[in-house]
Image (tube, rainbow, N blue to C red):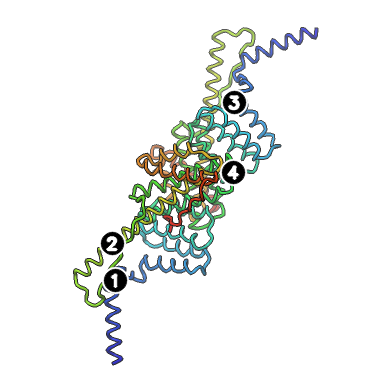
Amino acid sequence: MRIPAMGAFVILLAALCVSSGAQEPPPDSFEAKLEAIDIEVRKQETSAEKLEDQYLALLEGDLTPEQRGLVYVHITNIGRYCHVPGDVREAYALEALSYPLATTDALAMHVARARILRKRYADWRGRRFALGRRRIVDAALAALKFALDNGAPRKRVPLPGIGRMSAVEPSEEDRRRHEAQVAARGAAQQMERLWGARLTMTHTCAELYSRQPVDPEELRARASEALKDYPEAVQDVMDKLEEMLAYRRGERPRPPAPTLGGEE
Amino acid sequence: MRALTALVSAIVLVALGFWSDAQEPPPDSFEAKLEAIDIEVRKQETSAEKLEDRYLALLEGDLTPEQRGLVYVHIIDIGRYCRVSGDVQEAYALEALSYPLAAVDAVTMHAARAGILRGRYSDWRGERYAVGRRRILDAALAGLKLALDSGAPSQPVALPGIGKMGRDRPTEEQIRRHATEVAERREAERLQRLWGLRRGMSQTCAEIYSRPPVAPEELRARASEVLEDYPEAVQDIMDKLEEILKRRRGE
């Protein structure tokens, strides 16, 4: 009895693997090697420099430009788990952006760059801050434009569910429906990231210009120039600034900072 | 006798002022204020922050975009005399470049940016350095291209002299010739500065690619792309790289 039960379990596992949308890449493939380092990164047990070296070693292989770009994206992302100096992250983000990237990866690099600059100039004050702020807002507006060019929605998109599929002998129809649901979910997740980046970068622009020296005219001028095809997005930035200024004047509670960003 | 000497001196001074090519700007003018702060900078007696604030205060006046750009160019110069962080200098260089600048000033800003990035990445090694080096190269090649577009020569320019002009009633012809000589001298000085900047940035490109990982192919590819109309300038960079590499090999 035990052997047939074991056999059925093995068949079930095999069927699950066959039916699964995300098939395991071969262990020697670029994807598998990248994933192995990603796991190391998330464990947070290895130093950032060693992880960086591991990723960089991948570049010695015969990679496509897309794969090379992906390596730099992953190196930039080490900074989400360990301390990596902003200069290093910025250099990798810019390097990644010089390669053809998937939309969400390129978005993440633009957003990362705006955040790095924001941190770099965080302690600046007065006229000097006004100057650094222009560099941050340029990066944030570039991220915002990229998100808008890729269809970032103004409102959050609900994520469609994925129905269960019979693991044992699913019909062709079941399989097709499942694949369509997975694809729809993937597309909605991308839209959610774009929406998140739009929200975050709008907030960043407004927050920067609500700090001294307050300068709504400059923000409107720069946003209108960078986002000339998106007047609604410019107005969102200006409305958010007005909210921030009302908060600073004590007229309303602090506007909540968005927790979702394109980098996530 | 003393009164006569004073009178003669006054006449000479007035004449000198009248015929001088570099006439003093009015003391309340933008140029005079800028010059006053420049003098403070060179004295090295005031802190970098205070000097920066004084330059920035000029921006509160009603300035043209060219004048605003010039203020930022001068702020960068503080770094030649006092310690200013690279982040601050880079922000000012980028800000200056967003205004219409004279070619020499714009090239100087690109060169300054390349220098700042070079300092920032100087401790990096291996592949990380290779990534940072591309950012330095982008800045240096942008400056080099602008220098070449503005006529930067490959060899130093001889500076023509300016002949003396009689201060006592110079003729129309003498005044015209003098003005031409001054203009020629200024143009030669401009070209001389562009030549210096061209040479400096070519050297920067070669030096950063002589460090490991040595990558002459990458340097040639990137330089050829940016300087596609200037094959001679690309070759100059490659020759400099070869020279450095030979020196390192003890050849």
A95 above or below A20?
Answer: above
Query: Helix or strand or loop: what does disc 4 sit on?
Result: loop
Which residue shows up at 57% across the image and 7% down it?
B171
Query: Helix or strand or loop: what does disc 3 sit on?
Result: helix
Q: CA distance from mark 1 to mark 4?
A: 54 Å
Label 3 crowding class (10 Å Cα cut-off): few <14, some 14-19, many 20+? some
Q: Which mark is residue A125?
A: 4
Q: What is the chain letter for disc 3?
A: B
Q: Which mark is residue A20?
A: 1
Q: Which comes sooner in the sequence, label 1 or label 2?
A: 1
Q: CA distance from mark 4 to mark 3?
A: 27 Å
Q: Which comes sooner in the sequence, label 1 or label 4?
A: 1
In the image, farthest residue toward the bottom:
A1
Identify residue type, mark 3. Glu
Disc 3 marks which residue?
B31
Q: Are marks 1 and 2 on the same chain?
A: yes
Disc 2 marks which residue?
A183
B42 above or below B129?
Answer: above
Identify residue type, mark 1. Ser
